[in-house]
Image (spheres, rainbow, N blue to C red):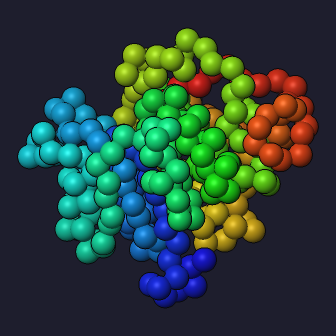
Amino acid sequence: MYRGDDTARPRIVLIGAGALGCAAARALAQSGAVDLTMVDDDVVEPSNLQRQVLYDGGDVGRLKVDAAAARLKANLGLTITTEAARIDAANAARVLAGADVVIDGCDDPDTKFLLNRVCVALGIPLVYGGVARTGGQWMLVRPGISCCLECVFPDTGDEIAQGCSALGILAPVAGFVGVMQAQSALAVALEPQRATAGRLFVYELTGARLRHVDFPARQGCTCRVAARTVADSPRRFAS
């Protein structure tokens, strides 16, 4: 754990360098308290620029992780590790191994659940985040202590399958959720006794509403925490 010296800084692995990932990465880098690894295999496209805040027109066609790392290094002088890869079942355990915290900044629901399963198996805290339309949500998962993502979302629906590319996304929502994911990651990495896990935060920009729901472990889930039943699980999940 971080104790104020560079040799003991926790390592945070951020999966995805899109709208959520950009906001989270900038907040983490500005904290100066962690070592950051960014993982994504996408390149910057013109359509990304209105919501992915680490890129500008000169970055179009460049790998997102390279452009993001260069921008953060130029502004803050930090060393950021990057990997141009798409997370899948074959490489997830290798990419996440050694992380103190993983942040889910991806836009693919299947990858979100894969991250959840691998983090549970490896005992690594995971900060889930999702945005769609004018709303977003985030939650800290602590294996062995809290519920996991599959406890909260045991079933998939049409909105999960579509993801944000089909549902649309409002840029300020992604920025807000990404920053809150970074805050959750910093909390569990630096002051785990104060980190709140198993609490799903839900934000709606229309009316600026923020609420939260605490979830216990779902009976029958494979996350290996004490089996307790979630009586009413939400069905809306967007990336």
Quarter of the view holding residue 209? top right
| Quarter occupied by the N terminus | bottom right
Residue 8 is situated, as x and y percent measured from the top left of the image, at: 52, 82
Q: Name which residue lies at 87% across and 26% down.
A: 231
Q: Is residue 13 above or below residue 152?
A: below
Q: Is residue 66 left or right of residue 128?
A: left
Q: Is residue 138 left or right of residue 193?
A: left
Q: Name which residue lies at 19% across and 68% down.
A: 74
Quarter of the view holding residue 196? bottom right
User: Which residue is outermost to the left?
Assistant: 58
Residue 165 is situated, as x and y percent measured from the top left of the image, at: 37, 22
User: Which residue is outermost to the top?
Assistant: 158
Q: Name which residue lies at 79% across and 34% down.
A: 221
Residue 158 is situated, as x and y percent measured from the top left of the image, at: 55, 11
Quarter of the view holding residue 171? top left
Q: Nearer the viewer, residue 108 or 210?
A: 108
Total numbered labels placed on residues in the image: 0
